[in-house]
Image: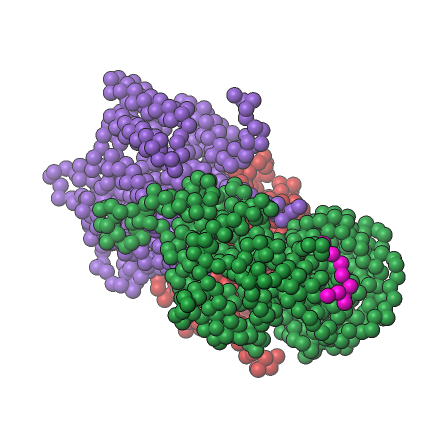
């Protein structure tokens, strides 16, 4: 089997997946370094982070398709989400209704922001990635002006509002999302807030949830295989890949069964699964897939592959790019709301700052590039990226006996990953272009 | 009688006073393969731009005359309108996306939405662009188009990795898939094809024509025209020379008509005596210059000779100088005055006494935001370390006084019209910019000078000045000069010998007084024997 | 200079420069009407100008070479920081410390600048994006180093545990404001840090001189028109590497000048966002992503840093309790960068 492998093929595989490989190795070392922690710790941490972040990472896929590269500017969308939460919380909104109002308010805001960002990307063609990073910082400044100065400074608000800085100008540096209905005792007159407004609509214990998800995937894999065999234009998965998928699903189901039969086994202590949040994420995955099958999706791909050919073929390139940016910005705004309802307290001036970086890094770790990103990349990326976050303090301890080192290592990994994978991708293009012009 | 499918009536066009088409009349009938031939600048591309309503025509004041489609006068304002009238174009550079399947390429921006109830709803709610696509129907259409061309490749194959010969067919498939296609323009379709592929393409063309589609076939390959076309139209200097059935003519006549009998301007009596020393010898030169690829050329140029390199655009004549100078990647053996010139090393070539005036004045030849003086001395300063002075004994700085003095001398010698030697070259007229380029090359005191397209985009008066200057350099300093030019007249009026390049290879070397037929046949890649 | 030449000079400034410059003048006038002494405002401006001068000057070589503004300024900055830390570790004091720091900074910057220049050649066309992440990454790489390198000088360590302190006082090596105080004097109440201004203007002159030399003009030509440079027998890649080494070295020396005036060496993530301020400053001065001059450095640093440093006291008085500096930095700084990016003309890929 190994003899069949071409050396250059192995090299190419390593080169194409270097970022993912680095992360996997890092995580394995981290897990070994902190083997004293129980499995449930990792799974709980990972699960919380996964449900919190996945939506935001998925928001990056459409702009990649449209050739805009990695949209660090989802920070702008996140800000729309923050503003809508501030608005709702300012009037003590909460519960499922409050959450829906958040999504509703965020929609027009994000469409407007996305439109403006898209216009900017059309003006900075060829430099969209650096522009998207800078526009995030720029929007941060404008947002701070609104939240820190305009509210109370230019728009008068009732004195003594609990969200305001005591002087009466600006929103407090942190404010609370309010407790979930189930946490409030019946006697109290407290109104439910936005915390866990989505997560806690419906929860399932870990093991049954595991079984439910595995069964869904199993059905999906089988149906896909059957459809692929009937349609000559689809690529049929290699038999061993197909059977491996089946085997993994069955193993997960068995694991779930074990968890139900032995509640005190090694799956003990794992928290419940937020099913609705999960469904929202799955819905976005399906939507992204559906989007690629639409005319707009196809136009995005045409524009992404070649703006010139798209123009010649009569596609309105600029408009398509703006629409793609709007989609991304709206999804980011909603993603931010999902993110914050899980966190529970809002860090008014910092919560959005790292959203762009972390989401992009996660997508890249999942194997995406500037020009190609899929749902699969996003989901794998979220898992690996957050696993890295969880184990990095242990790595710090392992190498220097200092957890702070782990924190810096983590930041280094985030930026390093973005730099490395973008750099390698660009270098490949530069090299291909150069080789083309060599004899 | 049935009206022609397309007729051009009295078409004239000028760009800012520069007449590029004069009173051209052409009729194209249904199911006819109509060849269009002419030298560069004969007006072929302008005519096609008019046919497709390109913005370059409308932004420059439109054109005179009219176009009729099926006997009805028609104004086409954009390529999309052309498409609606059933006119399709296959570009010389492929308009294909490598990351797409064949179907996706054929159906780009003409995708078929799926007929389904949910699609009606989403389409109504969120706009037509949110409808999903019917890939099955699209594949069927693509299949049908490919079948028409006799291609048995699977329509859902990814384009990337397919041999280049397929691309042309896929482009054609895309055009014939468009509804109501009546007329197809093929621009040098066989240029990138191997011989057998070209044969297949010609077969496919005949097949299309037999189905009633008219084809305008732009090609420089005379044998293909003779082989496949029904009618041939020859353009020369924007004028229609003749339209006649191919059966009534032959390659020699076409070649002669294409070049025409021309009066060579201002030719000196050939009293020039040349030494027998070989100044430059080139063996098996290959150059990877996109659009001007050189595929193995041998040349030798005598000392003191003015040597011309001619040929049609895109055939590789420009690649020779660019390759030897190391601007584009090159391979082969080049020796100058008996010594081997290292290839892909511009610095070494310049150092050994070879000067170069690029065909691309603004892109390669000049720093447009710098002064005339700096432009003139720059290369010499970098190569020979001249025009420098020491500051504080160890820092080499540009010696401004000396630079300006030299520049003023050059301005006087070459009669460069400018306000002063400090004027930016971007502000100069084309002719004066060209003189600055020549001045920069002369400053290096080369013994061999490459000059590419010396008179491109320059008015008549300036043209003559430049040519006179080159002749003077040859006569007075014995400089060896190699001129590459698209203008045959110009080469004939100044050169001692003229090499014709066709499809990246040397077609032959002719004396300046050779007949138009000889030039025409060579440029079309035909053997004199044929 | 006569009135007319001054007027025509202002007329030739780009519009964003005029707007931001006008804003700064407005802040100054507003400050005076609020009862703030103009001299103290100008003292701040001059000091900040000196602190940022070299860091902004570092943009010139990289822009001229065609690499674009040096968004990887932190590469140079960490070299300077490492040099200062090493000089303290080796026990240098005062002028000796300064000399040792500068020499080591240039050595470190030459090595890292070489690598950085090669990196920039490998990613032609997307230099700004990659440079930004190079800057971010190296900042955090050095964060790990600050915690783990085996420095022993008690002037820099924590009382407990390992690693260097976040800020290291330069007073402990007698280097607090060492350059500033050289020949310093008062002019109508404005403190002039003569030494620092000499260093800044001297460096500006040297860079100006460099671009008049053979190598310098080769770099400049390669940036303006790479094909022209190639046809003139130049190695454009090599020119770009030299330019980036110089830029990195200016960043390294620049942070030393900055730190001595500040009185502290700030480690860890302090360099993270420095590049954006430097890039913004030169753009405010009228440079573009493709062309820059020394005059852009001087005007831009003066206006941009003047605006940032004068805003807090002036607006703090008008609106007590709010600090608009951060907002100003984000909006004006990033706004001007976006404006410059929108001017970059690049074709479709």
Residue C14 visible in the shown view: yes
Locate residue B293 relative to residue C306 in the image: left or right.
Answer: right
Q: Is residue C318 left or right of residue B514?
A: left
Residue C166 x/y as whole percent: 50, 44
Residue sitting at 63 percent across and 65 percent down? B258
Height in image: A258 above or below C335?
Answer: above
Query: Which of the pair B473/B67 is nearer the observer?
Result: B67
Measured as percent of width and height from the top left, residue C22 is found at 46, 71
Q: Is residue C310 left or right of residue A83?
A: right
Nearest to the observer: residue B13 or residue A124: B13
Point out the stretch of residues depicted in magenta: B506-515
User: What colour denotes chain C?
Assistant: red
- The residue depicted at 74 percent of the width and 59 percent of the height is B499
Q: Residue at x 83, y 59 (%)?
A: B302
Instruction: Indicate the quadrant containing the N terminus of chain C: top left, top right, bottom left or bottom right.
Output: bottom right
| Residue B425 higher or lower than A233, as above or below | below
Is A174 colored magenta in this rendering?
no
* Magenta-drawn stretch contains B514: yes
| Nearest to the observer: residue A122 or residue C343 | A122
Locate residue B31, reporting x and y percent.
Answer: 45, 58
Q: Is residue B470 left or right of residue B184?
A: right
Q: Position of residue A387 (x, y in %)?
A: 40, 32
Residue C20 in view:
no
Q: Hue of chain A? A: purple
Q: Residue at x 54, y 24 (%)?
A: A4
The scheme the figure's colours follow is by chain
The green chain is B
């Amino acid at each position: 089997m190994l003899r069949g492998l071409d050396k250059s093929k192995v090299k190419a595989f390593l080169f194409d997946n270097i970022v993912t490989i680095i992360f996997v190795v890092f995580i394995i070392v981290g897990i070994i370094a902190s083997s004293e922690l129980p499995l449930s710790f990792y799974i709980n941490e990972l699960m919380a982070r996964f449900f919190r972040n996945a939506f935001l990472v998925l928001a990056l896929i459409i702009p990649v398709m449209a050739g805009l590269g990695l949209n660090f500017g989802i920070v702008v969308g996140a800000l729309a989400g923050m503003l809508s939460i501030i608005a709702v919380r300012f009037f003590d909104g909460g519960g499922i209704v409050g959450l829906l109002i958040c999504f509703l308010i965020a929609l027009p805001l994000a469409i407007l922001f996305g439109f403006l960002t898209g216009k900017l990307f059309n003006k900075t063609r060829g430099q969209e990635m650096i522009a998207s990073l800078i526009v995030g910082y720029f929007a941060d400044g404008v947002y701070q002006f609104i939240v820190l100065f305009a509210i109370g400074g230019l728009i008068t608000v009732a004195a003594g509002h609990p969200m305001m800085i005591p002087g009466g100008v600006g929103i407090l540096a942190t404010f609370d999302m309010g407790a979930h209905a189930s946490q409030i005792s019946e006697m109290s007159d407290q109104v439910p807030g936005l915390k866990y407004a989505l997560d806690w609509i419906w929860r399932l214990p870990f093991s049954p949830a595991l079984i439910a998800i595995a069964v869904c995937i199993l059905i999906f894999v089988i149906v896909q295989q059957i459809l692929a065999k009937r349609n000559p234009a689809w690529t049929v998965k290699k038999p061993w890949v197909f059977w491996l998928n089946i085997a993994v699903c069955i193993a997960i189901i068995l694991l779930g069964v074990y968890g139900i039969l032995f509640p005190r086994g090694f799956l003990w202590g794992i928290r419940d699964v937020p099913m609705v949040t999960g469904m929202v994420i799955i819905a976005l995955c399906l939507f992204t897939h559906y989007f690629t099958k639409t005319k707009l999706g196809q136009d995005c791909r045409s524009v992404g592959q070649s703006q010139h050919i798209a123009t010649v073929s009569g596609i309105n390139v600029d408009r398509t790019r703006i629409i793609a940016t709007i989609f991304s910005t709206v999804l980011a705004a909603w993603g931010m709301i999902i993110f914050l309802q899980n966190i529970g307290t809002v860090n008014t001036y910092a919560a959005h700052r790292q959203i762009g970086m972390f989401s992009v890094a996660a997508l890249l770790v999942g194997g995406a590039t500037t020009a190609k990103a899929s749902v699969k990349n996003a989901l794998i990326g979220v898992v690996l990226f957050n696993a890295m976050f969880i184990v990095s303090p242990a790595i710090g301890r392992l190498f220097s006996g200092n957890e702070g080192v782990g924190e810096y290592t983590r930041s280094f990994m985030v930026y390093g990953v973005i730099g490395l994978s973008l750099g390698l991708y660009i270098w490949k293009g530069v090299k291909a272009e150069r080789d083309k012009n060599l004899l | 009688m049935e009206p022609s499918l397309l007729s051009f009536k009295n078409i004239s066009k000028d760009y800012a006073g520069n007449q590029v088409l004069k009173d051209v009349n052409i009729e194209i009938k249904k199911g006819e393969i109509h060849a269009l031939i002419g030298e560069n600048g004969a007006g072929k591309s302008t005519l096609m731009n008019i046919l497709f309503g390109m913005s370059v025509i409308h932004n420059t004041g439109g054109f005179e005359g009219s176009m009729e489609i099926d006997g009805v006068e028609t104004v086409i304002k954009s390529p999309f309108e052309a498409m609606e009238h059933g006119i399709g174009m296959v570009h010389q550079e492929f308009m294909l996306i490598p990351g797409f399947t064949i179907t996706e390429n054929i159906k780009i921006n003409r995708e078929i939405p799926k007929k389904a109830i949910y699609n009606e709803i989403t389409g109504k709610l969120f706009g037509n662009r949110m409808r999903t696509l019917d890939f099955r129907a699209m594949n069927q259409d693509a299949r049908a188009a490919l079948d028409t061309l006799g291609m048995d490749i699977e329509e859902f194959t990814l384009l990337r990795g397919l041999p280049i010969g397929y691309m042309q067919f896929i482009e054609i498939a895309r055009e014939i898939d468009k509804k109501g296609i009546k007329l197809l323009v093929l621009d040098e379709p066989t240029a990138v094809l191997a011989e057998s592929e070209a044969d297949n393409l010609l077969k496919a063309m005949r097949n299309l024509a037999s189905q009633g589609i008219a084809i305008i076939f732009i090609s420089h390959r005379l044998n293909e025209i003779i082989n496949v076309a029904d009618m041939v139209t020859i353009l020369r200097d924007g004028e229609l020379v003749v339209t006649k059935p191919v059966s009534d003519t032959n390659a020699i006549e076409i070649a002669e008509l294409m070049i025409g009998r021309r009066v060579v301007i201002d030719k000196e009596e050939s009293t020039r005596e040349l030494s027998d020393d070989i100044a430059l010898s080139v063996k098996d030169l290959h150059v990877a210059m996109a659009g001007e690829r050189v595929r193995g050329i041998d040349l030798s140029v005598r000392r003191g000779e003015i040597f011309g390199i001619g040929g049609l655009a895109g055939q590789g004549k420009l690649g020779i100088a660019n390759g030897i100078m190391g601007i584009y990647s090159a391979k082969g053996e080049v020796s100058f005055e008996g010594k081997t010139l290292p290839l892909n090393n511009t610095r070494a070539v310049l150092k050994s006494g070879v000067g170069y005036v690029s065909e691309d004045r603004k892109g390669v030849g000049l720093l447009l935001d710098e002064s005339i003086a700096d432009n003139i001395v720059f290369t010499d300063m970098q190569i020979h370390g001249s025009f420098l002075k020491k500051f504080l004994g160890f820092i080499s700085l540009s010696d401004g006084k000396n630079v300006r003095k030299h520049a003023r001398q050059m301005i006087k010698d070459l009669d460069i019209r400018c306000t002063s030697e400090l004027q930016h070259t971007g502000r100069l007229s084309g002719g004066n910019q060209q003189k600055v380029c020549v001045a920069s090359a002369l400053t290096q005191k080369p013994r061999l000078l490459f000059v590419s397209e010396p008179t491109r985009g320059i008015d008549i008066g300036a043209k003559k000045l430049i040519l006179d200057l080159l002749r003077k350099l040859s006569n007075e300093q014995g400089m060896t000069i190699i001129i590459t030019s698209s203008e045959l007249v110009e080469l004939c009026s100044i050169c001692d010998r003229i090499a014709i390049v066709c499809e990246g290879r040397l077609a032959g070397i002719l004396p300046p007084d050779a007949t138009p037929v000889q030039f025409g046949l060579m440029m079309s890649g035909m053997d004199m024997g044929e | 200079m006569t009135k007319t030449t001054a007027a025509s000079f202002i007329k030739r400034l780009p519009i964003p420069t005029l707007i931001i410059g006008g804003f700064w003048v407005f802040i100054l006038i507003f400050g005076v009407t609020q009862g703030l002494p103009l001299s103290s405002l100008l003292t701040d401006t001059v000091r900040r100008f000196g602190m940022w001068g070299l860091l902004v000057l570092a943009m010139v070589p990289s822009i001229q070479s065609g690499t674009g503004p040096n968004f990887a300024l932190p590469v140079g900055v960490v070299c300077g920081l490492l040099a200062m830390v090493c000089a303290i570790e080796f026990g240098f004091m005062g002028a000796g410390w300064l000399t040792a720091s500068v020499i080591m900074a240039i050595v470190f910057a030459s090595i890292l600048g070489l690598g950085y220049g090669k990196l920039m050649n490998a990613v032609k066309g997307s230099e700004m994006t990659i440079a930004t992440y190079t800057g971010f990454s190296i900042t955090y790489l050095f964060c790990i180093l600050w915690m783990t390198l085996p420095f022993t000088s008690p002037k820099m360590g924590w009382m407990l545990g390992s690693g260097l302190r976040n800020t290291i006082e330069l007073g402990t090596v007698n280097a607090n404001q060492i350059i500033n105080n050289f020949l310093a004097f008062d002019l109508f109440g404005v403190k002039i840090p003569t030494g620092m201004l000499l260093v800044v203007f001297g460096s500006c002159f040297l860079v100006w001189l460099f671009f008049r030399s053979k190598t310098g003009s080769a770099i400049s030509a390669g940036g303006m028109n790479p094909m022209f440079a190639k046809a003139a027998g130049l190695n454009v890649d090599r020119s770009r590497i030299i330019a980036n080494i110089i830029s990195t070295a200016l960043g390294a020396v620049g942070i030393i000048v900055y730190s001595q005036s500040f009185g502290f060496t700030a480690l860890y993530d302090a360099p993270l966002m420095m590049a954006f301020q430097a890039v913004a400053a030169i753009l405010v001065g009228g440079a573009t992503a493709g062309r820059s001059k020394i005059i852009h450095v001087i005007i831009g640093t003066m206006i941009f840093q003047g605006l940032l440093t004068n805003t807090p006291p002036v607006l703090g008085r008008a609106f007590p309790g709010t600090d608009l500096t951060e907002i100003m930095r984000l909006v004006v700084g990033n706004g001007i960068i976006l404006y410059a990016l929108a001017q970059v003309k690049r074709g479709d890929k």
